[in-house]
Amino acid sequence: MPQIDDKLAPIYEEVVRRNAGEPEFHQAVREVLESLGRVVAKRPDYLEDALIERICEPERQIIFRVPWTDDKGRVQINRGFRVQFSSAMGPYKGGLRFHPSVNVGIIKFLGFEQIFKNALTGLPIGGGKGGSDFDPKGRSDGEIMRFCQSFMTELYRHLGEYTDVPAGDIGVGAREIGYLFGQYKRLTNRYEAGVLTGKGLFYGGSLARKEATGYGNTYFTQAMLKTGGTDFDGKTVVVSGSGNVAIYTIEKVQEFGGRVVACSDSSGYIVDEAGIDLDLVKEIKEVRRGRISQYVRMKGEGNGVYFVKSGEGSIWDVACEVAMPSATQNELTGKDAKKLVANGVTAVGEGANMPCTPEAIRTFQQAGVKFGPGKAANAGGVATSALEMQQNASRDRWSFEKTESRLATIMRDIHDSCYSTAEEFGAPGDYVIGANIAGFIRVAEPMRAFGVI
Ligand code: NDP
Ligand code: 2IT
């Protein structure tokens, strides 16, 4: 098991002590600190002025009550969060997650990852994350709207195009961003387009933002495959989830000639051995907001098409050469990783944030599987959010081709900087170490320049 350097171990112990009951946050911090031993061995000056301790402490954490009225006239109460983690590189930037599992530890892990991810994009954005334990499943449009309006009625005072710029994440897409933006505009009396990203195309959104995370992970994973002299063409691929990230991963993998044979939601997974019919998945998920099991009902069971209920098997039992986990944290365990390795997986690109457990990552790396960590592989979404901010600031609108071509270049640059940083720090081929160190150095330099703040 990778160890934390002796000089950094007390920092980790203090993070665990001061953030009790937040295992996902501890996991994210631990992974970064495991990589930083190599940095402080070369550059002990990074240990000065509690710089690493400061990176682990959010600049500001906001927790608030979100009251709203459901369709039956009953008052419901949820909890809202925004963790403004680091503004060393630019305004806080990161998504909002609406899911019943959301708590402060999950938002902190996501915000912490976001600092390094955003730094890796090379664009001027700090790190933050927010959300609520609100469960959008089964809620009407009216309920979603009233919830979003109440959420923004508190959050707006903490936002601004130069202060903090949220976007979507699990349970938050264009519909929710529309309601949030409308309420922000009404409360502030300002048409401040750059305060949110992932907006609709007819009021300041960027072409290719919706596709960007999935496309970006596909570009990143393609770059990893190319270091071994191969690509997606003809490869069998499994993509977990069937939300925003999963759908546009499947789209780009198919364009690159890969055959995606399985995807999932929290109720289970579907297999279509001939290759997933993406139009059908989009109809079920983007139009009907339904369950992935409907795929089998609509397509007809048999001929290699079937559904497996969650709890009765894992999507990672399905044999593939490339795995792209794109649902949620810790969805791919050590046991799953062993199964994937036994079935011949050669590359894993994390579309979700921290979907592989530490044991799974170790299993992949020990088996020589190319492993792209989320903070590098899924950075295309936030990078394109920064491109949306650029378009809003210059009152401009770029074509799909121009935006996608910028995205592709950014993803190849992230790949190359992770690859070369890993080599420079004595861990060739280790994208986890490469991403953590390259991201850390980019944030550490402005922090030192600013003094103790
Ligand atoms: P969506 O809400 O569009 O889709 C989420 C998908 O994951 C759904 O299929 C959902 O199934 C499944 N899922 C969510 N939670 C669980 C769970 N606890 N157990 C099993 N399945 C689950 O979200 P996104 O596609 O936007 O996000 C997916 C992942 O990608 C997240 O980790 C997010 O943080 C990350 N990400 C997103 C970016 C973006 O731009 N949107 C950018 C970078 C990373 P069900 O519908 O049944 O809940
Ligand atoms: O995890 C992520 O990078 C996101 N959910 C996207 C954040 C953003 O600001 O676009």
Image (spheres, rainbow, N blue to C red):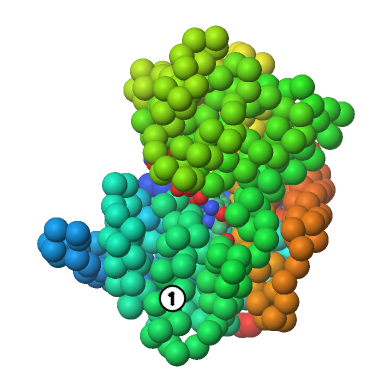
Q: Indicate the amino acid at tag 1.
A: Gly
| Mark 1: few/some/many CA within 10 Å (<14, 14-19, 20+) | some
Task: Classify residue 317 as left or right of residue 102.
Answer: right
> From this viewpoint, is residue 158 visible?
no
User: Residue at 60% of width from left, 65% of height from top?
Assistant: 201
User: Residue at 65% of width from left, 77% of height from top?
Assistant: 392
- Is 303 above or below relative to 117? above
Q: Residue furthest top?
A: 303
> Looking at the picture, how far across and down is residue 144, in whole percent?
33, 60
Count of numbered badges drawn on the protein: 1
As rendered, which of 62 and 257 lies closer to the eye? 257
As rendered, which of 437 and 217 lies closer to the eye? 217
Task: Identify the image quadrant of the C terminus.
Answer: bottom right
Helix, strand or loop at mark 1: helix
User: Residue at 53% of width from left, 40% of height from top?
Assistant: 282
Q: Residue furthest right?
A: 229
Task: Classify residue 434 as left or right of residue 53.
Answer: right
Task: Identify the image quadrant of the N terminus.
Answer: top right
Q: Residue furthest bottom?
A: 189
Residue on which disc 1 sits: 182
- Is 111 above or below relative to 433? below
User: Residue at 30% of width from left, 62% of height from top?
Assistant: 142
Residue 154 position by quadrant: bottom left
> Looking at the picture, how far across and down is residue 338, in whole percent?
55, 19
> From this viewpoint, is residue 416 visible?
yes
As rendered, which of 234 and 143 lies closer to the eye? 143
> Looking at the picture, how far across and down is residue 439, in whole percent?
67, 58
> Looking at the picture, how far across and down is residue 167, in whole percent?
51, 64
Residue 452 position by quadrant: bottom right
